[in-house]
Amino acid sequence: MATSRTSAPVLIVGSGPAGLTAALYAARANLQPIVLEGTEAGGQLMLTTEVENYPGFPTGILGPELMGKMREQAERFGAEFVRADATKVELAGPPFRAWVEDVEYTGKALIISTGAKAKMLGLPGERQYLGRGVSTCATCDGFFYRSRELVVVGGGDSALEEATFLTRFATKVTVVHRRDRLRASKVMQDRAFANPKIEFEWNSTVTDVLGEQTVTGVRLRNVEDGSEKVLPVAGVFVAIGHTPNTDLFGGQVELDQAGYIVTPNPPSTATSVDGVFAAGDVVDHTYRQAVTAAGTGCAAAIDAERWLEAHGHDSGATTDNWD
Ligand code: NAP
């Protein structure tokens, strides 16, 4: 649904926990934000089931329900939402411009909260069982696999960190890696090799995720000799890296080597472009939690508010036609 306004003191691109918290704070500061929320609004939590580690929900909450509540809360204070993907941005501002096809939206300040997506293997079963045995977040879902056997796919720090974490719950965790050598740092390798619950399937790829209602196993293929086998497991954690959603911004704001937006003076969320702030997983290599994304979203809204104030914006003013 399109908003009636196309310009605002604060324009927000992205609607996961970071974008929605930024929208809530900006709205309560009377900055009437417009949020380009994307066609797949709500971010990565829309792909999860039960969320048990978001504070304030002692019995847990479904990911989509949590995002729905955050959106409702921001809307209550005047945030407006555009259910479409930004197709182009122009960061030579202020005002900063973003387009949805040929409709132009402007913000005197801009908050980027477009998130990241977990890289997936691209297997049909993987998509089918996402949230029902396939996961990309051990911290989020490990708890559901008490006394079960699991597979972690990948050979980097994430894979070994997830595998090590999962041994708190699982009886056995098999790391499936496509080579015979890990990419992970030595300290992580040492820790994993010393853990009696972790085993390795070297030179192997997952070729299929098997299941009924939920995952029951994976089919593995040895890349050296082509042999196949089925490993019966209750869960598959895909840990082959993340991709930040920054295609729109390349060349206009500083990105690091992996494509994440750089905020050079933390805890400030300011980017290399004055008046442009970034929050959530689009910045964060490290924590990638809904609650940390929400925290930086809050910080971005406060940073934007202070920046606007310093640049003569009166938040009591009417906000139409900023440019
Ligand atoms: P990463 O370092 O890029 O490792 C990805 C792993 O997945 C690699 O082992 C890679 O195999 C494998 N892989 C990639 N695509 C695959 C595919 N299609 N099929 C099968 N395997 C595939 O990613 P990451 O582990 O998420 O780490 C990202 C960054 O965050 C790194 O800089 C890492 O050090 C950092 N990190 C640090 C910590 C920590 O210090 N606590 C924790 C997590 C992450 P190859 O090795 O064959 O390429």
Image (tube, rainbow, N blue to C red):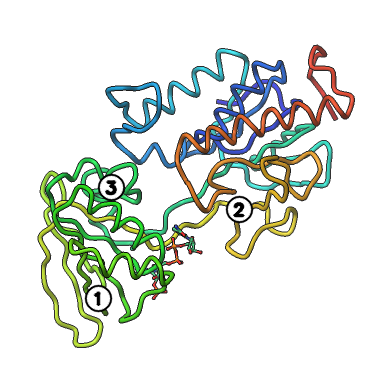
- For disc 3, the marked residue is 130
State the residue at coordinates (79%, 20%): 320
Instruction: Assess whether mark 1 and mark 3 are in contact (beta carbons under 8 angstroms).
Output: no
Q: Which is more N-terminal, label 1 or label 3? A: 3
Instruction: Assess whether mark 2 and mark 3 are in contact (beta carbons under 8 angstroms).
Output: no
In the image, farthest residue toward the right: 312
Q: Nearer the viewer, residue 196 or 151?
A: 196
The numbered disc on residue 204 is: 1
In the picture, the quarter occupied by the N terminus is top right
Q: CA distance from mark 3 to mark 1?
A: 21 Å
Quick one: SS at disc 2?
Answer: loop
The image quarter in which residue 318 lies: top right
Vertical placement of residue 311 versus 261, above or below: above
Q: Nearer the viewer, mark 1 or mark 2?
A: 1
- For disc 2, the marked residue is 246
Amino acid type, mark 3: Leu
Vertical placement of residue 243 versus 58, above or below: below
Amino acid type, mark 2: Thr
State the residue at coordinates (72%, 56%): 254
